Amino acid sequence: MTLRERLIISAYTGVIMCDFDIFHKYITEVLDRPVFTPEFANPDVLEELKEKVKPEFLKLCGNEDE
């Protein structure tokens, strides 16, 4: 599994599969804004992140049409 795939899965599921610093950088890129550590406990931020990566996550799962 590539690092990119692990980042997508981590963002969608909340199970961090890499170093937190790398994941944090990825999240700031996906959300296109600074993300502060306490925001990782905010359900709204987590839902926003999940929705942003959902198309890539589904593509990894073989469900591009969803």
Image (tube, grey):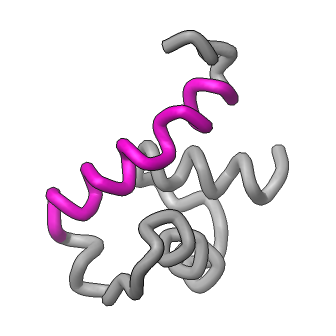
Q: Is residue 9 above or below residue 59?
A: below
Displayed quadrant of residue 3: bottom right
Q: Is residue 55 above or below residue 1?
A: above
Is residue 36 highlighted in magenta? Answer: no
Displayed quadrant of residue 35: bottom left
The structure residue drawn at horizontal position 82% and vertical position 44%, both measured from the top left corner, is: 1
Q: Give coordinates of residue 63: x percent, y percent.
A: 60, 14
Nearest the eye: 63 or 2: 63
Is residue 53 highlighted in magenta? Answer: yes
Q: Give coordinates of residue 5: x percent, y percent.
A: 72, 47
The structure residue drawn at horizontal position 40% and vertical position 53%, both measured from the top left corner, is: 14
Q: Give coordinates of residue 16: x percent, y percent.
A: 52, 61
The structure residue drawn at horizontal position 57% and vertical position 25%, both measured from the top left corner, is: 58
Q: Horizontally, is 28 left or right of 47 in the view?
A: right
**Magenta part of the chain:** 42-60
Magenta segment main secondary structure: helix
Nearest the eye: 58 or 3: 58
Q: Horizontally, is 53 left or right of 50 in the view?
A: right
The structure residue drawn at horizontal position 16% and vertical position 58%, both measured from the top left corner, is: 43
Q: Is residue 43 above or below residue 24?
A: above
Q: Is residue 61 above or below residue 22?
A: above
Q: Give coordinates of residue 49: x percent, y percent.
A: 37, 55
Q: Horizontally, is 46 left or right of 53 in the view?
A: left
* Residue that sits furthest to the right in the current view: 2
Q: How many marks?
A: 0
Displayed quadrant of residue 13: top left
* Residue that sits furthest to the left in the current view: 43
